[in-house]
Amino acid sequence: MADGVAALETRNLELWYGGFRALRDISMAIPRTQVTAIIGPSGCGKSSLLRCFNRMNDLIPGARVVGEVLFDGRNIYDAGVDATEIRYRIGMVFQKPNPFPKSVFDNVAFGPRVNGMDDNLEEMVERALHRAALWDEVKDRLRRSATELSGGQQQRLCIARALALEPEVILMDEPCSALDPAATLKIEDLMRSLAGDYTIVIVTHNMQQAARVSDMAAFLMMEEDRAGILVEYGPTSRLFTNPKDKRTEDYITGRFG
Amino acid sequence: MKKDPAFRQQLRTRQLRGRSFSVLFLMATLTGILVLTVLLVDVLRDGIGWLDWQFITSYPSRKPDEAGVLSALFGTLWVMVLTALFSLPVGVGTAIYLEEYAPDNRLRRLIQTNINNLAGVPSIVYGLLGLSLFVQALALGRSVLAGALTMTLMSLPVIIIAAQEAIRSVPQAHRLGAYALGATCWQVVRHIVLPSALPGVLTGSILAMSRAIGEAAPMIAISALVYLTFIPTSIMDRFTVLPIQIFNWVSRPQAEFGNLAAAGIIVLLVVLLSMNATAIILRNRYQRRTEE
């Protein structure tokens, strides 16, 4: 892949939690404006890898990154880079919907507000809610608490909250694992409609989901010392139909994991 | 269904034991309530007849008919307000630092252990500390300020612990969500942690202070004054507080002073209960607001 189209690129990335190595030698380039899925068995470091992309691991005491994560041509772990700026440009959606105990409006407006973009808040919020396919459901209850929404609506609100900052990349950490199939379908449709404008990286347990939504897929697994490694990375269609690595094949055909 | 007689027999025993424990626990509960009721009834019977406007608006006197709690009541209010002003910002600030900023290292654990231990130090020790530190070393005299600072020292550990618990109960998912949107640590504290923790912080703080207000021991060390015939008008004035006044009346042989003490206790209880009521009202109001 040419350098110009990678939104994010890791080079020999290692992640340590204290003395425990959670990730080893991860090198991958995530293409711009496509959906990249990270799959693999539980505990292999998928979510840890995802958190490397917006420096959320900084918040975990003892976490340390070795190697590089290139975003916009520079290593986000360089001394001069502010994690706050990275998170402003790279949004994140979590496993469990986590709306703030505030109104729908204030939830979406939170990002713009803390980043000092107070002009045209109304317009920004409406645009983000439209983009997250939630506007019609909440337009009459913007001032009511976000916690009254259903789980699926809450998760789309969290996506809208991330979109309000117009991020270049959106990281999603198993965004549907707490949702029912109907709500899951809506989020998946949303992901497909967002791809093209945004670079999306999604961690998922669900093979079918990865096959349905992603353009690229990365298969991670644990080695004997419990460090996660990148076994195989390539276009989703190829990875699922014609895996090059025996371990990938075993995993996607359900022989282990 | 199994018809095992041994099981049946054992089941009856188990259920009997279950029932007897529920009775036991009910009795434990009733004991506390009963004692409280007896105490209240006794105090009310002794004091209610003496509790009138004259009692509220008079200074202490050698003649029971003319004695009142005016100076003590205002002393208590002064100390209470100043204590709140000092201890709330410092206590909540400490709790925020320890929970949201301090790295989890030796120093933090040392501070935490110290705070936990300080919460258990007898109040008279704080009184003596206040006496030597504020009254003597800092030459504040036996002033309202010295009293309030002593009360602040005494309530701080409890306020810090209550605030820490309130802050800890804010879901981590909310903090992470805010960080992921590019919020700084202070913005997370200001917009996410504090609004959710505020009801708990307020309730804990007010309860800690109402506890302090009822303490006589440290104030006796600081003030030791009973016949005060003026209301403090500045923080450097001398003062007395309700528990000291009550303590003084109780220790007199004449029966009338016993009744005065009971009336004083009623006034103190009203002050304490209204503080607790404030805590409850504030908590309910903020909770409703965060749920909206």
Image (cartoon, coloured by chain):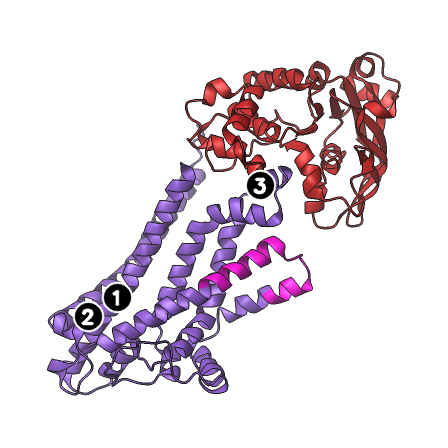
Chain colours: A red, B purple
**Residue B138 coordinates in the image, percent (x, y):** 49, 83
Q: Which residue is at 84% across, 28% downward?
A: A28
Q: Is residue B31 visible?
A: no
Q: Amino acid at mark 2?
A: Val
Q: Is residue A238 left or right of residue A99?
A: right
Q: Closer to the camera, B159 or B31?
A: B159
Chain hosting mark 2: B
Residues tagged 2 and 1 counted as in contact (Cβ below 8 A) = yes
Q: Closer to the camera, B9 or A120?
A: A120
> Please, what secondary structure does the residue beneath circle 2 have?
helix
- Is-magenta flag for residue B232? no
Q: Amino acid at mark 3?
A: Val
Q: Closer to the camera, B82 or B96?
A: B82
Within-10-Å neighbours for mark 3: few <14, some 14–19, many 20+: some
Q: Quadrant of the C terminus of chain B?
A: top left
**Residue B70 coordinates in the image, percent (x, y):** 22, 75
The residue under label 3 is A114
Q: Which residues are magenta?
A: B88-111
Q: Which residue is at 46% across, 81% downward?
A: B134
The residue under label 1 is B269
Q: Closer to the camera, B119 or A196?
A: A196
> Please, what secondary structure does the residue beneath circle 3 have?
helix
Tell me where residue A5 sits by quadrant: top right
- Is-magenta flag for residue B106? yes
Residues tagged 2 and 3 counted as in contact (Cβ below 8 A) = no
The residue under label 2 is B43
